[in-house]
Structure formats: C-alpha cells, structure tokens
Image (cartoon, helix red, strand yellow):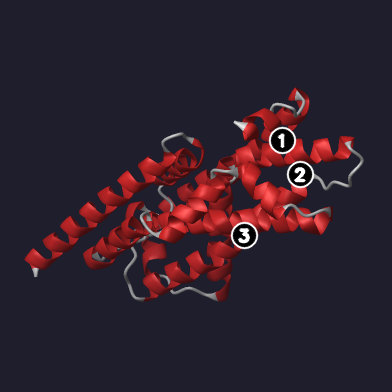
Amino acid sequence: MASASLQSTLPRNNRIAVLTGLGGITLLAWIYLIVTAREMGSMKSVMELRVWTGTDFVLMFFMWAIMMIGMMVPAAAPMTVLYAAVARKAANEGSPISPTSIFVTGYITTWVLFSVTATVAQWMLQRAALLSSMMVTTSPLVGAGILIAAGLYQWTRVKMSCLKRCRAPLYFLSEHWKDGPWGAFQMGFRYGVLCVGCCGALMLLLFIGGVMNLLWIAAIAVFVLIEKVSTFGTHAGRAAGVAMIVLGVLALARFTLVL
C-alpha cells in the first residue's frame, strides 16, 4: 500500500515517460526475437549439425541477452516507477538524484551477465548432442531433470527470500538506497541479482519448450510477472513448482519404463 501511494506521487507525464521507455526496450527486444526465430526456423538442419565457433558463441550470447531483456524488463516496471517517484521526491527536497535510466541499466546488466551462463549451458548441451535444431532438449532424462530441479527450486528458502524482496520494492529501496549515478547503478544491479535468484531457474524451462519458441518465451515471461506483482504470486509459484515436479517424475518414470 505504501509503495502504491508513493508511486502515485509521480506526475502522470513522468510515469508515462518511464513506462514508455520500458515498453520501448521490451518491444525492440521482441522484434529482434521474432526476426531471429524466423531466421533460425529456416536454418534448422544447419543449426542441428553445426559446431559452434567463437562467432556463434557471441551471437548466441547476444540472443540470450536480448531475450532476457524482453522477458524481464516488464517485471521490473513497478520497481522502476517507484525509483522514479523516490528520486523525484528527493530532488524536490534538494537531494542529488540520478536518472532512472541508470537504475534500469544496472538491472539489465545483471541479466546480461546471467546470459553468459545460459549461453554456456546451451553450448554444453549442444556439444553433447542433447539439443535439437530449435534448441529443445532431445534427452528425456535431461528434460525430466530440468523439470524436477526447477520445481524443487520454487520451494527453496533462497527462492522465497528473493521473491519476497522483489515483491516489496519500497522495502528494497529503503534498505539499499545509495546516492549518485554509481549508487543508482548498484541498486539496479542488486535488484537484478534478486530477480535472478527468484526467476533464473525458470529460464531452464526454455530448454524444455524451445529456446526460440516465442509462445513459450512469452508464457514464462507472463508467469514471472504474475509471480512478482500479483497478490497470489507466491502461491502461484509454489503451485507451479509442484506441477513441474510431477511432470518431471512422470517423464522420468516413462523413460525408466522404456529402458
């Protein structure tokens, strides 16, 4: 309630400017993803057999980084609007402030760094011949393991702690506020770290539905948003965890029976 009240103090034109900026970043990311998905769809056989070069690794990293931006920037909207409101209030009181864009840059930087790990994971799976041309795991065992691991993580203390802090932006800012441009970047980066702790494991599910399956990407992005901003987000996350564990166990059982 306090967070919503403070957000409402931000003038309407400022709020529109912040949300338009975030929307523009998200739209550009999704345009890139749509174009890339179409290009990869026309190169299925090549992608399946190709051994990665250094250029391929960089291009895949870039793809992951843009995808994370498209998925995770909308989930940071409430925090970003709140930061803008607090910064404006501080400016009115004569305190030095930093542009909201610096805070957002810090947040995005976290997910760009996360993309390095995701790219390495994809490279290792492809090197082991465990990915299809559309970057879906071809191993029932790996698929089951991902589902169970992601489902169990939904119930861990780390997940719950990160989610709780992500859902309390005012508390986060009061606890971690720092002045100056570097301080704004640090706050954005720290908030991004919490988001990675909250949602990073869910990104493993991209190897189940397809790294470039646009509907699957959108579904995960919507679920992340629900977890972070809806009143039932915590319960939804735990319920999804149970569902993932059940599906993983069923997949594992089916694989065992086939053997």
Question: Residue at (54%, 62%) from the top-left corner?
Answer: 115
Q: Residue 18 — which label?
A: 1
> What SS does tag 1 mark?
helix
Estimate how packed mark 2 is, as few (under 14), some (14 to 19) or many (20 or more) residues with alpha carbons within 10 Å: many
Disc 3 from disc 1: Cα separation: 20 Å
Q: Residue 100 — which label?
A: 2
Q: Quadrant of the C terminus?
A: bottom left
Q: Is residue 36 left or right of residue 181?
A: left
Q: In which quarter of the image is the N terminus?
A: top right
Marked residue nearer the N-terminal end (3 or 1): 1
Q: Where is residue 187 in the image (x, y as percent from the top left)?
A: 70, 54
Question: Residue at (64%, 33%) from the top-left corner?
Answer: 2
* Mark 3–mark 1 CB contact (< 8 Å): no
* Mark 2–mark 3 CB contact (< 8 Å): no
Disc 2 from disc 1: Cα separation: 8 Å
Q: Which amino acid does label 1 sit on?
A: Val
Q: Residue 110 — which label?
A: 3
Quarter-wise, where is residue 3 in the image? Answer: top right
Question: Residue at (52%, 46%) from the top-left corner?
Answer: 71
Q: Position of residue 124 (x, y in %)?
A: 41, 74
Q: Which amino acid does label 3 sit on?
A: Thr
Marked residue nearer the N-terminal end (2 or 1): 1
> What SS does tag 3 mark?
helix
Q: Is residue 132 left or right of residue 28?
A: left
Q: Where is residue 92 in the image (x, y as percent from the top left)?
A: 88, 35
Q: Where is residue 30 in the image (x, y as percent from the top left)?
A: 55, 43
28 or 185: nearer the viewer: 185
170 or 19: nearer the viewer: 170
